[in-house]
Image (tube, helix red, strand yellow):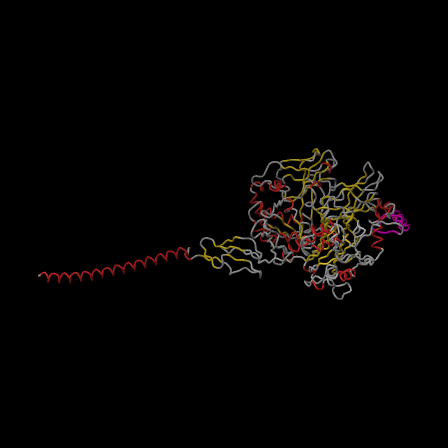
Amino acid sequence: MTSGTPEVTAPLEMETGGGGGGAVVLLLLLLLLFSSVDETLGAGCRGKCGQAQSDCSCRPTCASLETCCPDYREFCLEFSPHSGSILGGADFLVLHATFDPSSIIACKFNEDVTTTGYVDERRRAHCVSPLLYQTGWVSVGISTDGGVLFDRLGSWLSVHTGKLDSKWKAVLVNSTKWQYYGTPGVGGTLEMTWNASQVKAQTVNMELWGYRETGKAYSDGWRAEWKYLYSLARGRPNNGSFAFTPRPSAEFSDWELGAVRIGSGAHPDGTRNVEAAWSEDHALAWHLEPSFRHDPAAWALDKCLAWDRLETQLPHFLDEIIDCPCTLAQARADTGRFHTDYGCDMEKGSVCTYHPGSIHCVRAIQASPKYGAGQQCCYDSSGVQVLTADSVGGSTPDRAHDWGSPPYARPPRVPGQSHWIYDVLSFYYCCLWSDNCAYYFKHRPSSDCRRYRPPGSAVVFGDPHLITLDGVRYSFNGKGEYALLTSPGRRLSVQGRTEPIRGSATAKACVLSSVAAREASSDVLEVRLVEGQLQVLRNQERLPFSEQSWMDLDGVFVFSPCAANVTLMFPSGAGVEARLREGTLTATVLLPEEFRNATRGLLGNWNGDAADDLVPAQGGEAADAGDAQAVFRFAASWAVTNTSTLFTYDSKYLLDNYSNSSKHDPDFIPAFSIPEDPNDPLYNLTEDICAGNGSQFCRYDILVGRHPELGKASKASFQSHLWLVESLKPAVSCGRLAPPANGKKEGTAYLLGASVRLWCDEGFARRGQERRTCRADATWSGEDTVCVPCSNGNDAVVIAVSVVGVLLLMGQIATCLVLRARRRQRLTNAQDFHSSFGRFQLTEE
């Protein structure tokens, strides 16, 4: 270990240099003078990215509109790669710009962390991403004068270590072995691999860094800290693989969470913010003190008990987290509020290390408002929620949300690491390294689903066709930009753009081509069709998903697992999903219960009353969904304005047809009915494709839109929506039924119709029902089941003995009566005999 290694705590402070004050001031004045001259002339983008000048533009749209200032690429920067680990170490270059080889490159991240860059042999500038305590896009300013003026601007995507693709990090081979090392039966060598190109060096050092949180929890002095601990090896060949036999480290054993960094051998040990590959953060079982290896269970129990004492002193957070969905189907369908937990994903093989017996888990997307807590919900193969009261693999709430939450840099909101400190290491202590889960589950009990309310759903698809939140189905084929949903009270706006079907001169119909959304002051997100593909824009700038599938943005999360699917998730729990089907765009809106009686627009007034869904923007009588022309007038009234629009206009086509034209085109008159012409060459094909539920939408899209593929896509979208509605049906839960004291139970499903069998331990007698069933009123049938001690140890034996005793007594009495009767009979017979014999003798004489 190198002594005197500086420690970094979050939030980090920028380091400033001293000396040469007069020259620096003079240089700054000159630069400000030149800057003001540039501004006066309106000639460039220095310090003006995102702005429009009088004769040119520095906005992201300028590239496609060909209106950029000449120096746009020099000052408004793009990077490659554009993302990397929250732990830093990524070397990325500036695209589309060249630099003087003598430039002294400095890179400032998020206005407070500065790293040193360089210019390569091709005159390209490079930066190295630093250790950050937040995820999402952070601003990057680049200076060419060593850090005096940062006048070139761009953005860098900082990614949670768990969400980072393996090609961007060092991989722990058999990670379970790493985290159980030293426990019985786990030893030998540990191995890790990495992409050697991540570190441009012939030799590398292997360094262990530790993480901890200091200060009193929930106080102003609570801080996060990453620190260099010691090196595992130095000067090793950079061949992408390293294996070693761990040794205990008593000196650093109190650092129980950390990561391994592979960095250039040219840097001194512990040098910060240099090019490197990081492993994922993990429990450091492999370096814990010798006492851990001697008796892991005892060591872990002591830690578990200490954690138990700490938890009793910390604020209670369970009441402010959202309840879990009742079923796996609900959990997977409620994409506005819950997202797949990457540690237990049925789409990727259900490797549920911390939830044995579960096949899929989800996490609440938003952290709780006050304490930044999280919720996790897990389900078994039958689709039933698994509770910790029934299984060690059950759902667990989290004091610290795994994905962190704004403002990120302070505990317990540091992405990943805060969750490890307060929720994961304690699970190792109490459950994995010792058998004391009762302590853990006392503080992390599963939430059941009795308070869960599924969201409402609405959809726009096809030509386009709409199904409102209250289930009204109708079609609207106007051309323009419209308010799909507006909720002023909740500050949510979702807009849709429609345009005529291309490729058919006779088609009198439109399709949805773009959907845009914003909640409160969040980033504006737009998902649009461009040449048959989905394109995502954030504040008019294209978002690249070539490196990451999840992005933390300002006031919204975005997830794009593939090129055909994009989901927007807002803090309120509202979700907007855009899906590409057969070259067409389908948009689904999901709203939590809080939006009831608070929505208007093309997707209706969500209040359970279908009759008032199609009310015009100016108010008045609702249109009849069966009157196509009345529906057309209703929908036209919901055209947006130039002041309310969320859309991006970055092409001549969009400028001419939407920005500089009426938001509802009065000259475009669609077909209001489906032509029924048996001679139409598409007629018979339509009958084959569109059979079944929702055929009217499919038929319209083929016979009016003149596209069989569009009809197929509409049918698929309609059926998908039916599945969504079915999946989100409310479920009746009676709540967990515990086994009786001194008894057991069979059954862990607690929804309507589920049955649980209850019985007592030996030596106890059951009173109440043996089998209880969940009823429609959310109560369990029958009386409570209790187990009472048997008298004198065993009532059954006493009763049996008593019964036998009674039977024996009755037998004895019966025997006596029979014998007495027989004696009486014999006596009577004898008397009769003597009498007869006497008479006989008299006669003989």
| Placement of the N terminus among the 4 image quadrants | top right
Q: Where is residue 702 drawn, in percent x and y?
A: 74, 52
Left/right placement of residue 117 relative to residue 29 reads left
User: In this view, which residue lies farthest toward the left?
Assistant: 845
- Residue 772 can be seen, yes or no: yes
Quarter residue 481 falls in: bottom right
Q: Can residue 557 be spotted in the picture?
A: no
Front position in the image: 531 or 554: 531
| Residue 566 point in image, percent of width and height | 72, 50
Boundaries of the magenta span: 30-53
Quadrant including the C terminus: bottom left
Q: Is residue 546 magenta?
A: no
Is residue 49 within the magenta segment?
A: yes
Count of marks, rendered view: 0
State which quadrant residue 276 falls in: top right
| Residue 582 position within the rendered picture, expressed as x and y whole percent measured from the top left | 73, 48
Q: In this orientation, which residue lies closer to the viewer: 777 or 267? A: 777
Percent of width and height locating residue 589: 71, 55
Viewer-closest of 190 and 766: 766
- Observer-nearest residue: 203 or 54? 54
Judged left or right of residue 816, residue 740 is right
Residue at the limit of the structure toward the front, as seen here? 679
Give the quarter of the image for residue 273. Answer: top right
Q: Residue furthest bottom?
A: 620
